[in-house]
């Protein structure tokens, strides 16, 4: 019997085990945090729930209360804390990031377009595509607004808004030359790992759109 049980464990599909663990984590998103904090305990009685709440309060509140108190004491220097309490709205941009609405100009300036060397035939074709890119951004801004511009940014970087500390690496754009104009083959591509999009060099704005 013991050997049969062992055989059952050995023949279990590792992918199935991994999927079951993934599902369990989605159902219990705080389990890993509680386990790492040493607070994960089985709840068998109502009193166990109270103990779990105490553990969570310690981890989230009491454990960092000393650091928060020192932060408040530091902010009292030159009456900064009093000024923050009197004018919270004025200080909010310094402590809370609020992304500005995207515009065509902002998106155009955000990306570094990498052109070929001056004098090469590719350079002239690329400059034409850059003009298409600018016109396309203006059309999107006028017709669909900042939300769709955020979609374009997400296509190239994975983020719908510009992060508080900017992108790293900086967003860029490069060109794909000599691709045949086929269904789906002339569409832009992107690599969000390096915040880079690739535009196919086309001769007509209608094909670019």
Image: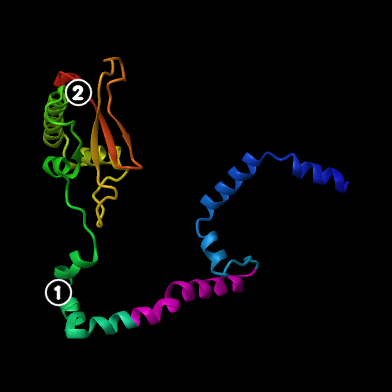
Checking the image for residue 136, the label placed there is none
Measured from the top left, where is residue 46 in percent x and y?
Answer: 60, 70
Measured from the top left, where is residue 83 in percent x and y?
Answer: 16, 79
* Residue under label 1: 87
Q: Left or right: where does residue 26 sit relative to residue 11?
A: left
Q: Is the residue under label 2 in contact with that under label 1 (CB below 8 Å)?
A: no
Measured from the top left, where is residue 192 in percent x and y?
Answer: 33, 40
Q: Nearer the viewer, residue 160 or 24?
A: 160
Q: How is the image coloured?
A: rainbow
Checking the image for residue 208, the label placed there is 2
Sort mark 2 into few (<14), some (14-19) or many (20+) by Cα contacts within 10 Å.
some
Q: Nearer the viewer, residue 45 or 79?
A: 79
Element under disc 2:
helix
Q: Left or right: where does residue 181 sit relative to residue 46?
A: left
Please provide the residue range marked out in magenta: 45-69
Give the main secondary structure, helix, strand or loop, of the magenta stretch: helix
Q: Which residue is located at x 55 percent, y 65 percent? A: 36
Q: Tell me the quarter of the picture where residue 199 sits.
A: top left
Task: State the separation of the CA atoms marked 1 and 2.
Answer: 49 Å
Q: Left or right: where does residue 200 sit relative to residue 22?
A: left
Element under disc 1:
loop
| First reached walking from the N terminus: tag 1 or tag 2 | 1
The stretch drawn in magenta includes residue 112: no
Measured from the top left, where is residue 102 in percent x and y?
Answer: 17, 45
Quarter occupied by the C terminus: top left
């Amino acid at each position: 019997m013991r050997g049969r049980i062992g055989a059952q464990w050995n023949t279990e599909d590792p992918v199935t085990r991994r999927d079951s663990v993934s599902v369990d984590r989605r159902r219990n998103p705080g389990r890993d945090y509680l386990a790492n904090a040493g607070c994960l305990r089985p709840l068998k009685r109502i009193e166990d729930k109270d103990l779990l709440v105490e553990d969570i309060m310690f981890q989230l509140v009491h454990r960092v209360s000393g650091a928060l108190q020192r932060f408040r004491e530091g902010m009292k220097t030159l009456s900064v804390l009093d000024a923050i309490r009197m004018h919270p709205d004025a200080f909010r941009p310094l402590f809370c990031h609020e992304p500005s609405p995207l515009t065509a100009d902002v998106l155009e300036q955000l990306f570094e377009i990498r052109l070929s060397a001056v004098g090469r035939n590719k350079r002239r074709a690329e400059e034409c595509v850059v003009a298409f890119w600018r016109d396309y951004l203006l059309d999107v801004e006028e017709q669909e607004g900042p939300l769709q511009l955020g979609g374009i940014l997400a296509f190239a970087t994975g983020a719908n808004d510009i992060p508080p500390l900017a992108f790293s690496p900086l967003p860029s754009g490069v060109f794909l030359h000599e691709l045949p104009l086929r269904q789906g083959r002339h569409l832009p591509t992107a690599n969000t790992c390096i915040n880079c999009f690739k535009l196919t060099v086309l001769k007509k704005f209608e094909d670019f759109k």
